[in-house]
Image (cartoon, grey):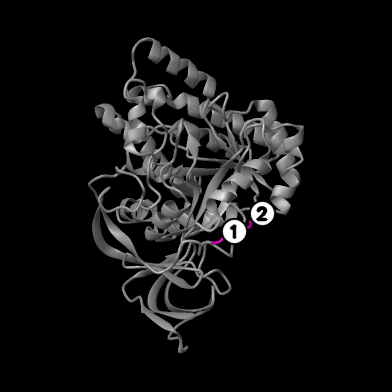
Amino acid sequence: MSILIKNGRIVTATDDYFADIFIEGETVSAIGKNLNFSADEIIEAKGKLVIPGGIDPHVHLEMPFMGAFSSDNYETGTLAAMHGGTTTVIDFVIQSQGKSLYDALHEWQGRATGNVYSDYAFHMAVTDFNSETQLEIKDLIEKEGISSFKTFMAYKGALMIDDRQMVGLMNEVKKYGGIVTVHATNGDIIDYLVAKNIATGNVSPKYHYLSQPEITESEATGRFIDMAYQTGSNSYIVHMTCEEGLNKVRDAQKRNQKVFVETCIQYLVLDASVYDKGFESAKWVMSPPIREIKDQKALWSAINQGVIQTVATDHCPFMWKDKLKGENDFTKIPNGAPGIEHRMELLYSEGVNKGKISLNKMVDISSTSSAKIFGMFPQKGTIAVGSDADIIIFDTEKKHVLSASTHHHHCDYSAYEGHEVIGKAETVILRGKVAIDSGNVNINKGYGKFVKRSKLTNII
């Protein structure tokens, strides 16, 4: 199968020009002006953006959490991603304490294999680092192509590891060219504040937010950065939300330490006023919580300053019936919200269209940097000869309203209900095949492939 894309405005993280693209099989074969190739399909892209398929480096599909499963499985979640222009997702395999990393990998492979629309990769979440776990790291990186390892500094008794385990993991992962990522919030302080609020009858969703003040994130961020500095480990902070946390990263840069940082689209678009809606605020109960407008402004600035490299979603939806379990106790509300479909269009509408970021920066934070940091570049994350033909033809003039009535998430509410955006992925090509065309799905479940990632020997 071959495709010729004509007359598009091609934008990558570094370039912006008008040209044609010829695709043969799964990869880009030629780029140039007025290409005269015979193709099975010709797509006219005049007046449209032609950009790399998005990479969402932080999603949770069919994840067991707080007595429920996130409501999007690999089929529904990756299809929703594709509708929004995200062609590759990185999900989290989560080790159960007392079990091996490979036990968890086999469990998640069983959920994903044959069910995926987009391409996908895995992070390995390490919740029990010990002498046996340590022996699995080398094979996971070198044989399985899983080079990133997630840690939690919160959720004691379920996910959290202590500082000694963190340092041990960092040293082991460093040996084989991997990277350690972190949920950086101080679990002990949060647990204390949660218990204090519950004891005094503060049980509404707003107290989820008030139990995780900014200091809990900035303290853990600084501690993780110091451990990474001491070990020399590649390090990446997931879902950064606040100005004080960003300042810890800036302090590290003063001593020439490189720390990679991710934020999520909800922290760029929403603010803490979502917690003033009574129990409806349960829709936005997530950890870390959505913060203040001053933090939102700081995050946009940090993107332009290069302090933040990637924008993800932390997509982890739950049905409303599951959120209702916490109607009388916010600690029983499953944490997470839907968003995998809306990241690219919100970045364009709220970022590019409002003059907060450039088109090149949008491509960088939505695709290219994730590909580079997590060992997929240049196979993914750019439009270049030899790269996978993961391409979005993006209509910058298309206005539409985000709503649970029209989104493709398997979730009965939207985190952005009624939000009008401008810009939409019109045609989405995955590995040389038109997967989504004006909302129509042209691929079958199972077309998505697992991406084995390389060692991280030359991270940006």
Locate residue 206 relative to residue 88 in the image: left or right.
left
Name which residue lies at 47% across and 60% down: 117
**Percent position of residue 433, x then y:** 46, 72
416 falls in the magenta region: no
Q: Amino acid at mark 2?
A: Gly
Pick the residue in front: 388 or 269: 388
Name which residue lies at 45% across and 89% down: 36
Residue 16 can be seen in this image: yes
What is the C-alpha distance between the residues marked 1 and 2? 8 Å
Locate residue 393 relative to residue 132 in the image: left or right.
left
Q: Amino acid at mark 1?
A: Val
456 falls in the magenta region: yes
Which residue is labeled 2 in the image? Answer: 145
Q: Are marks 1 and 2 in contact (CB under 8 Å)?
A: yes
**Percent position of residue 206, x then y:** 33, 24
The range drawn in magenta is 449-458
Q: In the image as oriented, which residue stretches furthest toward the top?
A: 200
Main structural element of the magenta stretch: helix, strand or loop? loop
**Percent position of residue 441, x then y:** 37, 66
